[in-house]
Amino acid sequence: MDRSVCVIGGGIAGAGAALALPDALDVTVFESRAVGGRLASRRREGCIYDVGTDHVLLADGDLRELVADAAGDSLVEIDRPVKQFDADGTISERPAEFPRFSGRDGIDTLVQSLFETSGARIEEGATVTALDRRGGQWVVTAAGHRRAFDAAVLAVPAAAAVVLFEGADWDATLRRELARAADDIAHRSIDVVALHYPFAFGADYYGLVSIERASDVVWMGREQCKRGHVPDGESVLTLQLGSLWSAANANASARETAIESAHYVARLVGDDRLREPDWWDHHRWGQGVPTDGVDAALYERPLEFGLAIAGDWVADVGQAHAALASGLRAGRQLAERFGSDPGA
Ligand SMILES: Cc1cc2nc3c(=O)[nH]c(=O)nc-3n(C[C@H](O)[C@H](O)[C@H](O)COP(=O)(O)OP(=O)(O)OC[C@H]3O[C@@H](n4cnc5c(N)ncnc54)[C@H](O)[C@@H]3O)c2cc1C
């Protein structure tokens, strides 16, 4: 019978793990909601906009090739550059540029296509509530059912990992250490606002990034630069608000947040039309990105039990390409344990 592996978490780290696990293994992915995780997109009135990760940086040629092969047509490169702005709102060129990508039908479809290529069985709406060790196997409880696997990849955010470490009944000392370390990781929340306009807003850049950490708006992207996202003659701007703004305005309504963002961006780019979007959207990511890292060696220790751990918090960088690389690494580590060709 095929040996079985479960991947817990259907974000880009889980997708990396599923891709790296050889075809000879029987792989099941458990995802609480829908695959994509913080690579999240929304759809409204013919527009697609990314409300979590804005784009994936694929500066590393090997990683870019792997994603291009696995994602095929759903990968779209954003060909306009990103510029920067300072506290006075002065816009200037950035010293270095990197290749940036989204998904043609939304950045979430990029993750979906990686999972499809992996051939793993995906179970969406399946929150794993317990991860136990019994008779040399991992027993997963999801949606009230228990299933045993020969190995597991834990690819959930740190807070969810803490819950599973605390509840598990294997090596008590190690899992307590893992839970404590994961619990210590600080995160920053991020508010994302999308603003829609029934006219084209042209510029010679794709996005603007703030060079001031304390800025109210730290990022503005033009979704119309992502092929397939916005019909001609319309514009969707996505803004990420700074953590200081989010902390100071924790009780602001979504409407107030959207209006304030629209006024900010109109001032920044000097175009008064942008003060009045015809519709808008808002999402707050409570634990948006980890702000500090972990002792990577600690998270290698469960490998001896056939458990690999992946995610941006393990990768030490709160970015999608790092989460993907950590998932690929987790999958390869388990493949090596099984003595299989990791690239198969
Ligand atoms: C607003 C925002 C903007 C960002 N912008 C960028 C950017 O432009 N570029 C960039 O590189 N990075 C960006 N990032 C960071 C990037 O989104 C993350 O680093 C990356 O998505 C992390 O991927 P992951 O797979 O580790 O985690 P996630 O994407 O969080 O995936 C984990 C998955 O596990 C699932 N899950 C949780 N608990 C369970 C459970 N018990 N059972 C089953 N499933 C479970 C979750 O539903 C989720 O789908 C941004 C993040 C935010 C919030």
Image: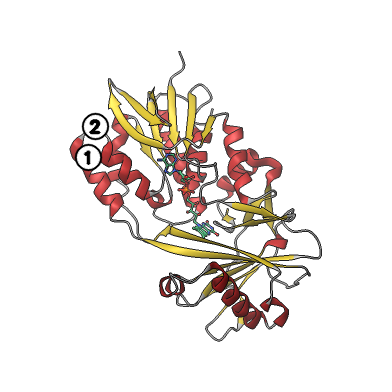
In-image side of 191 versus 333 (left or right)? right
Q: Nearer the viewer, residue 37 or 334?
A: 37
Q: Position of residue 339 (x, y in %)?
A: 41, 24
Circle 1: is it few (<14), some (14-19), or many (20+) Cα within 10 Å?
A: some
From this view, report whether residue 180 is shown above or below residue 257: above
Name the residue at 47% across, 40% down.
32
Report the quarter where the C terminus lies.
top right
Query: Which residue sits furthest right?
Result: 233
From this view, report whether residue 91 is shown above or below residue 209: below
Q: Position of residue 119 (x, y in %)?
A: 58, 29
Is the residue marked 1 within 8 Å of ligand 1, measured from its CB? no
Q: Position of residue 201 (x, y in %)?
A: 75, 72
Name the residue at 43% across, 69% down.
250
Q: Nearer the viewer, residue 167 or 24?
A: 167
In-image side of 148 versus 56 (left or right)? left
- The answer to the question of whether label 2 and label 1 lie on touching residues, with beta carbons closer than 8 A, is yes
Report the quarter where the N terminus lies.
top left
Name the residue at 47% across, 64% down.
190
Tag count = 2
Q: Which residue is mark 2?
A: 170
Separation (CA) of disc 2 from disc 1: 8 Å
Q: Which residue is mark 1?
A: 174
Is the residue marked 2 within 8 Å of ligand 1, measured from its CB? no
Colour pattern:
secondary structure
Q: Secondary structure at mark 2?
A: loop
